[in-house]
Structure formats: C-alpha cells, structure tokens
Image (cartoon, rainbow, N blue to C red):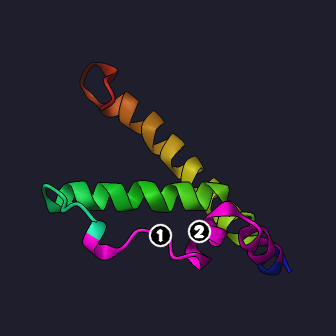
Amino acid sequence: MVRAAELQRWSASEEYREILTGTYARREDDRPANNLTDDVKSAARSYKESMSTSADPLIKTINDIGEAVMGAAGKVWSKVAPNGAAE
C-alpha cells in the first residue's frame, strides 16, 4: 500500500513528466569522476538522500537504526580518540 502511494506521488511529479518527454540524464552526459572514491561518495550521498525521503516504513526503520548506530559509534569514538577529537 505504501509503495503504491509512493508510485502515485512519483507519477505526479515533475521528474516523472520530464522522463516521459525524454528529458533526463544520459550516460553520455555523465562527467567522469576524478577517481573511484569520488564516484562512491557521490553514490552514497544519493542513496542516503533517497532513503531519508522514502515513505516506506521498512526503509524508515532501517534509516532510524542506522542513525542510532552512527550516534552510538560517534560517542564511543569521542571517548577513545586522542584528546576526545572526532574526525
């Protein structure tokens, strides 16, 4: 049910209308990444953004768990890092 609602929302979006008219990014338009690290970081940012805006309850739960784990890891790191400095 949630996925159907998400599909309806997306099908009413400007992004979807642009795809239907053929206005979308194509592989030949991609700028090559300077290196693999930049490409991976860009993909990670894109996935994170997609997950944070998802209406799917499972994705929201996974996102919440990930944020809790990262918060706890940050607290641990700040206690064990030299001078309490976190990077």
Q: Is residue 22 left or right of residue 30?
A: right
Going 47% across and 34% down the picture, which residue do you hit?
75
Q: Quadrant of the N terminus?
A: bottom right
Q: Nearer the viewer, residue 79 or 16?
A: 16
Quadrant including the C terminus: top left
Q: Quadrant of residue 31?
A: bottom left
Q: Name the residue beneath numbered marker 2.
A: 18
Q: Main secondary structure of the magenta part?
A: helix
Mark 1 Cα-neighbour bin, 10 Å: few <14, some 14–19, many ≥20: few
Q: How many marks?
A: 2
Q: Which mark is residue 24?
A: 1
Taking the image as shown, residue 28 lies to the left or right of residue 54, namely left
Span highlighted in magenta in the image = 5-28
| Lower position in the chain sequence, tag 2 or tag 1 | 2
Question: Any magenta on residue 2?
Answer: no
Q: CA distance from mark 2 to mark 1?
A: 7 Å
As drawn, the residue found furthest toward the left would be 35
| Amino acid tagged 1 | Tyr
Q: Measuring 31% from the left and 23% from the top, which residue is drawn there?
A: 85
Q: Answer with left or right where residue 63 lies relative to residue 74.
A: right
Q: Are marks 2 and 1 in contact (CB under 8 Å)?
A: yes
- Asked if 61 appears above or below 27 in the picture, the reply is above
Extreme-top residue of the structure: 83
Q: Amino acid at mark 2?
A: Glu
